[in-house]
Image (cartoon, helix red, strand yellow):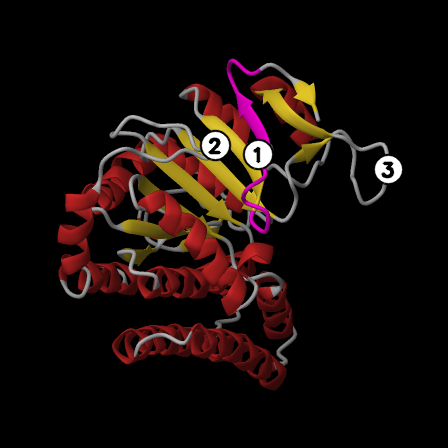
Amino acid sequence: MSPDQQELNVEVEGDLLPYAAEHSATRGATFSATGRTLQRQDVLAFKFGGTSLLGSQRILHAARIVQDASAASSVVVIVSAMKGVTDQLLRIAQRIGRAEWQQADRDARQVVQLHLDTLRDLDLADPVRDRVAHELKLLAADLLHETRSVRHAEDQAAVIDRLASFGERFSARLFSAALQKLGVGAVPVASSDFVLTCENFQDARPQLEQTRRLGRQVLLPLLDAGIVPVVTGFIGSTQDGRITTLGRNSSDFSGAIVAHVVDAEELVIWTDVDGIYTANPAESSEAKLLHEMSYDDAHALALTGAKVLHPEVLPLAAQSSMTVWVRNTFHPQRRGTRIGPASQEGVA
C-alpha cells in the first residue's frame, strides 16, 4: 500500500466519519452547473485549473463553489497544481539532471514554503491545520528526498514524472482542507492509486477499463457517504506502482477520466475565462463567446491548439453522452459554454 493510500484510509476511517453521517442525511434535490434539478443519483465532476487555485483566497472561493453544489449533490473534484508550481518542479528536475544539487534543494524548499504559507493563510481551526501541516511536511520530506537521492542510472523521464506529481498532491490536500473549513466533508485522493497507465513516462496513456474498475472502488464509497473526493489531476501510475504523468496541461483529461469513472452527468471545467470563444479574446476584438457546441466541433477546436480544452476530453465524454461545461471560476454566475450531444450551436 502506498503512502497516499495509507493517508486516504486514515482520513476516511478517522476524522471524516462524522461528515459521512451528516452529509448522507442531508442529500436530496440536486444542483447542476446551470441550476437545473438533477436526479438524486447524478454526480457532478468539477475540475479546477491552476489559476483558480493560486493562493488561499482563490482556493476558498473555488471551495465555496463546491460547497454550494455539495449541499445537495454528489460532487467529485479534480485539482491541478497551483499556477506556476509544475514549471518550478520541472526546473528542479533540470537542475538534478545537471547535478546542481544545492540549487535543486533550494528550489524545492521554495515550493514547500509556498504551500505552507497558503495553509497558514487558509486560517484553519487548530486540529485541521495541524493535521494538514503534518501531511504537507510528509510530502515535503519526500520531495526533498527526491532532490538528493536520484540514481544516475534511473530513467530520467521517470524522475521527472515523480517530481512533477508533487504540485497536484500538495494542491489536493489544501483544497480538501478548505472544504473542511467550510463544513464540507472532503478527503484528498491520489489518482495514482487508481489511474493505471502504460510506462510511457511524461505522456502516459491510461488503461481505462482497469482505471474505471479501481476508481469506482475508491471513489464511490466516498460519494455514497456524502464526502467530496478531491482527486489529483495529471498523474497516474504503472502496474508496478511507479508514478506517471499524462502530459503537460492534461488535468482536463484527468477530469474527464474521473468523471467517466463515476458516471458523472456533467463535467465542469472551471477556468479563468467565460467559456470557449471563436478566437482568443485577448488578441481579437471580434472574438465571440460560444454558448453551445457539439462534441465534434469542440474536439476539432481543441485539436487546433485551443488552450481551453485538452483534445482527449471530448472523445471520452462522448462515450457516455456526458455534458461538458467550460466556466469561469471568478464569475460563476455566468453560463459558460456547454458541450454535449444534443446542443444547438450558437454565439453570444
The foreground one among 90 and 269 is 269
> In terms of sequence position, does the residue under pointer 1 or pointer 3 come before the other?
3
> Which residue in the protein does label 2 denote?
34
Q: Tell me where the magenta segment starts and ends, as one range.
A: 329-343
Q: In this rendering, is residue 338 above or below 160?
A: above
| Discs 1, 2 touching: Cβ within 8 Å | yes
Mark 3 neighbour class, 10 Å CA radius: few under 14, some 14 to 19, many 20 or more: few
Q: Residue 198, position in %: x, y? A: 43, 41
Q: Residue at x 78, y 39 (%)?
A: 280
Q: Residue at x 40, y 59 (%)?
A: 172
Assign the magenta stretch its main secondary structure. loop
Q: Is residue 122 magenta?
A: no
- Report, in whole angstroms, how far the alpha carbon at label 1 lies from the one at label 2: 7 Å
Mark 1 neighbour class, 10 Å CA radius: few under 14, some 14 to 19, many 20 or more: some
- Of the residues shown, which amino acid type is indicated by label 1? Arg
Q: Residue 78, position in %: x, y? A: 43, 48
> In terms of sequence position, does the residue under pointer 3 or pointer 2 come before the other?
2
The image's mark for residue 335 is 1
- Of the residues shown, which amino acid type is indicated by label 2? Thr
Q: Residue 42, position in %: x, y? A: 30, 30
> Which residue in the protein does label 3 denote?
285
Q: Residue at x 25, y 38 (%)?
A: 216
Report if residue 290 is visible in the image: yes
Q: Horizontally, is 7 left or right of 200 in the view?
A: left
Q: Nearer the viewer, mark 3 or mark 2?
A: 2
| Discs 1, 3 touching: Cβ within 8 Å | no
